[in-house]
């Protein structure tokens, strides 16, 4: 471990660790958890601005492209507000909050808390979300429950908690007693996703499976492999349990596609999406470089419906295009698409490099496959891949809470990767000094 002590007091260190725990724990079971956490992170940084900046400046080279991607998104949004008279200033609210979300990273590298604060918050949040959503589904008889959120956003975030819990299991591989908790958290998150009825998350789960296979050689722990296999097997088994409604949702989706392809009504969950994507092609073709204001996109969809180019069944659901890529292109053109790619690709590249550094830092012992920063790096890649998967059938970044969960989780995991890297360097230097002393 790095023996350099932070220059903030112990109460502040404990406070930051507590905030890190609260963020995932409160995200699904309260209406204010995500927003509250984002504000408190910023206010805490403002209490120690110079120390926080000095701490993060040491890592500027590693994080600069990630920060640049979110800064580009903010500046592009500002340019659109200034250039489009019809665009309201509140259009800047989300990109500004997302940029300020990196205050969480600053606090991690300043206070250097244990990442168990995050792991226990994730596990606790998933375990609390499952009975909450189950109560809504089976007691209140809500067909598509979502807690305090839209059912899709709830299911997507619950799946993120499950995937992060799976990555956290790597840190607990040597303790059977502790390893049971990330396993329970992962299963609870998967269960909450299934109960919410969210189908877009299934794509993200498939992408996560590919990532786990890509790092299969690194997952040498038998317990971790059993947990991964058991989690995916349990999720697959829900298809055969009628109470969960998974088979019903699959059959419904296939029927919706067949009806749409046969020229029938698009008034269905899948049909609406297919028809909106059809309309998006017309809108993007007309303004490919800079796109249109979101309100103008909705107006254009109404115009297309009047012209008979799309079915008017979609108008009730035309607040967005149900696809993050198309939404970014329609509202920002090529430049908007670059912003969307940046806020996904730059964090993923950071985490992939962090995982790569950890693989090179190990020796010949099997346990070195798990260098200190591998678990948060893997968790970060899972979160980014998850959001990419969600965005294929939903505009997950349309929701402020969905967007802020992403940036705060990415920022925290980046911070833990950075301090793990510092610890590895300090240990290597200490080892060299010991050898030279001998």
Image (cartoon, grey):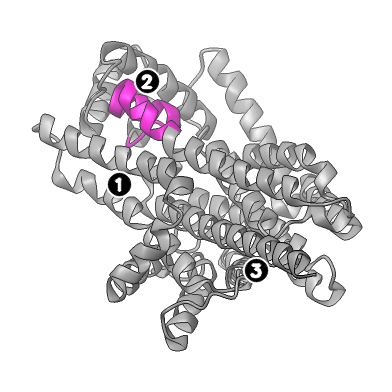
Farthest residue in the right direction?
Answer: 222
| Sequence-first disc among 2 and 3 | 3
Asked if residue 355 shows in the view, the reply is: yes
Farthest residue in the left direction?
Answer: 85
User: According to the image, label 2 marks what residue?
Assistant: 280
* Image: 121 above or below 216: below
Q: Left or right of 96: which side holds 30?
A: right
Residue situated in front as seen by the camera: 422 or 146: 422
Q: Residue at x 21, y 33 (%)?
A: 295
Q: Left or right of 111: which side holds 100?
A: left
Which label number is shown at residue 123? 3
Alpha carbon separation for disc pair 2 and 1: 23 Å
- Locate residue 172, reporting x and y percent: 77, 68
Q: Secondary structure at mark 2?
A: helix
333 within the magenta span: yes
- Locate residue 59, reporting x and y percent: 46, 54
- Please identify the quadrant where the N terminus is shown: bottom right
Q: Left or right of 423: which side holds 38?
A: left
Q: Residues within 10 Å of mark 3 (few under 14, many from 20)?
A: many
Alpha carbon separation for disc pair 1 and 3: 28 Å
Magenta residues, as a range? 319-341
Q: Quadrant of residue 338?
A: top left
| Sequence-first disc among 1 and 3 | 1
| Sequence-first disc among 2 and 1 | 1
């Amino acid at each position: 471990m790095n023996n350099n002590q932070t220059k903030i007091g112990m109460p502040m260190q404990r406070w930051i660790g507590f905030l890190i725990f609260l963020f995932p724990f409160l995200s699904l079971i309260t209406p204010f958890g995500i927003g509250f956490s984002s504000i408190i992170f910023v206010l805490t940084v403002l209490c120690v601005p110079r120390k926080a900046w000095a701490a993060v400046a040491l890592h500027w080279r590693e994080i600069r492209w990630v920060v640049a991607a979110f800064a580009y998104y903010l500046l592009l949004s500002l340019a659109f507000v200034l250039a489009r008279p019809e665009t309201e200033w509140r259009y800047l609210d989300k990109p500004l909050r997302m940029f300020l979300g990196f205050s969480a990273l600053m606090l991690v590298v300043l206070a250097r808390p244990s990442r168990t604060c995050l792991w226990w918050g994730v596990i606790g949040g998933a375990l609390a979300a499952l009975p909450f959503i189950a109560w809504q589904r089976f007691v209140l008889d809500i067909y598509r429950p979502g807690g305090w959120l839209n059912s899709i956003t709830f299911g997507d975030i619950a799946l993120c908690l499950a995937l992060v819990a799976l990555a956290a299991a790597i840190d607990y591989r040597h303790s059977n007693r502790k390893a049971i908790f990330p396993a329970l958290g992962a299963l609870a998150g998967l269960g909450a996703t299934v109960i919410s009825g969210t189908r877009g998350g299934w794509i993200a789960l498939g992408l996560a499976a590919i990532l786990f296979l890509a790092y299969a050689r690194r997952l040498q722990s038998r317990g971790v492999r059993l947990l991964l296999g058991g989690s995916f097997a349990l999720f697959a088994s829900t298809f055969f349990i009628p109470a969960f409604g998974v088979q019903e949702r699959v059959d419904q989706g296939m029927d919706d596609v067949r009806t749409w392809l046969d020229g029938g009504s698009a008034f269905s969950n899948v049909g609406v999406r297919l028809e909106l994507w059809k309309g998006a092609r017309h809108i993007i073709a007309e303004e490919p470089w800079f796109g249109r204001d979101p309100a103008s996109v909705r107006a254009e969809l109404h115009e297309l419906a009047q012209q008979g180019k799309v079915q008017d069944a979609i108008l009730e659901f035309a607040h967005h295009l149900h696809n993050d890529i198309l939404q970014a292109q329609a509202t920002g053109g090529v430049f908007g698409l670059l912003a969307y790619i940046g806020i996904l690709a730059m964090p993923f590249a950071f985490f992939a490099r962090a995982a790569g550094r950890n693989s090179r830092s190990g020796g010949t012992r099997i346990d070195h496959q798990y260098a200190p920063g591998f678990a948060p790096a893997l968790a970060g890649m899972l979160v980014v891949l998850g959001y990419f998967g969600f965005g294929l059938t939903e505009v997950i970044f349309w929701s402020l809470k969905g967007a802020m969960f992403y940036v705060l989780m990415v920022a925290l995991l980046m911070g833990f990767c950075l301090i793990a890297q510092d610890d590895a360097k300090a240990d290597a230097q200490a080892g060299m000094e010991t050898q030279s002393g001998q």
